Amino acid sequence: MPEKWKPDETKVDRQTKKVTKIKHYLHHTPTQELKDYLEKSYTRPKLIQKAKKELKRRSERA
């Protein structure tokens, strides 16, 4: 399973009552968002590790 960046969101269209799930996977997260997260004053250690690992993976491929 791919790693999650944020919890899943459930959006409901109020007119049609259609339910859509939005999944936030780490490999879909923009690089700039990961860098900005690492520069914050308070960040969760688990997410710091995930962000660093993903940025390392991307730099090796590019």
Image: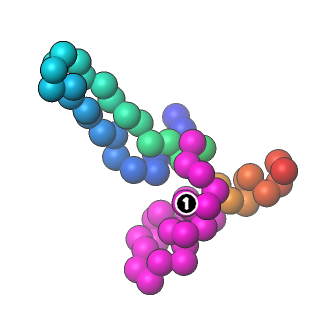
Q: Is residue 13 left or right of residue 32?
A: left
Q: Is residue 16 above or below residue 53?
A: above
Residue 35 showing in the rendered view: yes
Give the camera-side residue of 15 and 40. 15
Q: Position of residue 24 (x, y in %)?
A: 44, 42
Q: Position of residue 4 (x, y in %)?
A: 46, 46
Q: Secondary structure at mark 1?
A: helix
For image coordinates 25% across by 32% down, the residue present is 11
Task: Tell me which secondary structure the magenta stretch mostly adopts.
Answer: helix
Q: Position of residue 55 (x, y in %)?
A: 68, 59
Q: Quadrant of residue 15?
A: top left
Q: Is residue 22 above or below residue 6?
A: above
Total tally of numbered discs in the picture: 1
Q: Is residue 28 left or right of residue 20?
A: right
Give the camera-side residue of 17 and 10. 17
Residue type, label 1: Glu
Indicate whether residue 31 is drawn in magenta. Answer: yes
Q: Residue furthest bottom?
A: 41
Residue 53 showing in the rendered view: no
User: Bounds of the magenta span?
Assistant: 28-52
For image coordinates 55% across by 49% down, the residue present is 29
Q: Which residue is mark 1?
A: 33
Q: Is residue 16 above or below residue 4?
A: above
